[in-house]
Amino acid sequence: MSAGVKAVLEAIQKLDPGQQITVLRNTVVDMGFDSAIVSPREYPTTVDSMVERSEPAPTKITIEGIKEPTVLRYLQR
């Protein structure tokens, strides 16, 4: 991770859980997601349907402290 990404994650980790949800929700909305347009039944069910790569995916990504397979698969794709 870059120093900037680490700083952002550290800042979010220092917030209480309610504030974390608000920050992350606002980030997603600011990126253009509108829950009024997409219902939960229409959410993509696989990473492949959410992201297209323009170059080959790395074979293995490790991030200190991140063990969740779904997150790691998302980053690999």
Image (tube, rainbow, N blue to C red):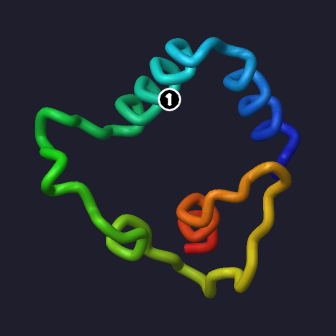
Relative to 44, is 38 on the left or the right?
A: left
* Image quadrant containing the C terminus: bottom right
Residue in the image at 42% along x and 69% along y: 47
Q: Position of residue 70 (x, y in %)?
A: 54, 63
Relative to 31, is 18 on the left or the right?
A: right
In this orientation, which residue lies closer to the viewer: 68 or 51? 68
- Up/down of 54 relative to 45, above or below: below
Q: Position of residue 68 (x, y in %)?
A: 63, 58
Residue in the image at 70% along x and 81% along y: 58
Q: Position of residue 27 (x, y in %)?
A: 47, 30
Residue in the image at 51% along x and 77% along y: 53
Relative to 63, is 43 on the left or the right?
A: left
Q: How crowded is mark 1: few (under 14 residues within 10 Å), some or many (20 or more)?
A: few
Q: Disc 1 marks which residue?
A: 24
- Up/down of 26 relative to 1, above or below: above
Residue 16 picture quarter: top right
Residue in the image at 43% along x and 74% along y: 52
Which structural element holds mark 1?
A: helix
Residue 74 picture quarter: bottom right
